[in-house]
Amino acid sequence: MERQDSPSAKWWQLAFGVICMAMIANLQYGWTLFVDPIDQRYHWGRAAIQLAFTLFVATETWLVPVEAWFVDRYGPKIVVAFGGVMIALAWTINAYADSLAMLYLGAVIAGIGAGSVYGTCVGNALKWFPHRRGLAAGATAAGFGAGAAITVVPIARMIASSGYQDAFLYFGIGQGAVVLALAFLLRKPSTNSPVQRKSTRLPQTKVDRSPREAVRTPVFWVMYAMFVMVASGGLMAAAQIAPIAHDFQVAGVPVSLFGLQMAALTLAISLDRIFDGFGRPFFGYVSDNIGRENTMFIAFSTAALAVIVLLTYGHIPMVFVLATAVYFGVFGEIYSLFPATCGDTFGSKYAASNAGLLYTAKGTAAFLVPFASLLSAAYGWSAVFTLIIVLNVTAAAMAMFILRPMRARYLAAEEHPAALGAHPIRAA
């Protein structure tokens, strides 16, 4: 009989979490395929339709701390099962939505379901892999980043052949059913493993801090601000990639790459999901070896360069495909690096709750998505791209010159909690 916390058990738990994440990926990354078809049917306007995306992301992220509270106390099964039901219900509502109010209701329900799955699976991975947090969080987040890759083409074809309503209905029910089934296989580890190593390369706390203690620290809010900066650019790009391709007049242009030939937009979205999915565990693994902040600097700087290329040469179909792939390949790492950094800084016991609080930064960033539509309408996509470049460059500088020294001072002072205004709980 296998021991409860055997080495194979944690890898199975990681795999279940990755699959669950893949099943909710289309709620965010497949959304861009539905924007123009919905607008063509009801003529509500892109900005009004994109508000549904903002409501989804805001609900998904801001309720994660509540959902994580249940996970930390009752385990992952019930929360993920609830999420599976909600995501199936959400896309069923979208399939029949004939008003913006109904579309927004579907977005809110989708956000509740996605947040239940996302926060639970990432938090559970941090608990199972205290010594490989970057890799574990990255692999789990990869399911969310790359999960849409294998379904982008089928969804696009179903929208073209049967209409977007059928795509919402059938994919929604299928995704929800898989999550519901896997929910009953998830569990938390029986004990919290104490941190066994600490180095200047990868400094980690020796104590566990509650969410109340974490939010009282300046280092938490520096991470939060950086998360908002980088996430806002990625969410703008994810939600607007199809409108951008249409405005650049490259959406339907055939592009051949890696032996494949398809429309530039379809190929771009597929490669974006693949690169995004690969980048999350890759940069998580890199950060486990060279440090979180060093990896952030590399990724954020590369993202800025990719957007500069897109701004300058994006009207060339091949450049559009490759530049967006590179951008998403380095954007998705925020969903592995920030949870891992949060776990390193505040410990394992409350990892799901603390990471959930930090994850609400994505919801804050989502409010810039409709703003991007308005900005592009007034000043063109160059204004949107310039904003994304500035945000990434600023975040890269903050990682090296603010976050890194601040975290080093904070962790060095952990043996003197009175100086921090906190009362740490020693790890079990």
Image (spheres, helix red, strand yellow):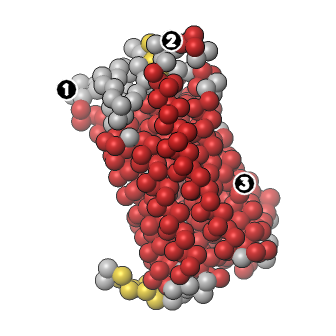
User: Which residue ends up furthest to the bottom in the rendered image?
Assistant: 253
Q: Is residue 343 above or below residue 19?
A: above
Question: Which circle marks residue 416 in the picture?
Answer: 2
Residue beneath the point at 63% across and 68% down? 385
Which residue appears at 51% of the width and 74% of the height? 309
> What x and y, as percent, mark residue 272?
46, 67
Alpha carbon of mark 2 to alpha carbon of mark 3: how far?
Answer: 39 Å
* Residue at image mark 3: 367
Kind of residue at badge 2:
His
In the displayed structure image, the side of residue 94 where residue 317 appears, left or right: left
Please state which of the two labelled residues, at mark 3 or mark 1, is closer to the viewer: 3
Residue 266 seen: no
Instruction: Give residue 280's position: percent from left, percent from top.
Output: 41, 52
Residue under numbered circle 1: 1
Q: Quadrant of residue 200?
A: top left
Viewer-nearest residue: 234 or 53? 234
Q: Residue at x 45, y 69 (%)?
A: 325
- Does 367 appear above or below 186? below
Q: Secondary structure at mark 2?
A: loop
Is residue 400 shown above or below 412? below
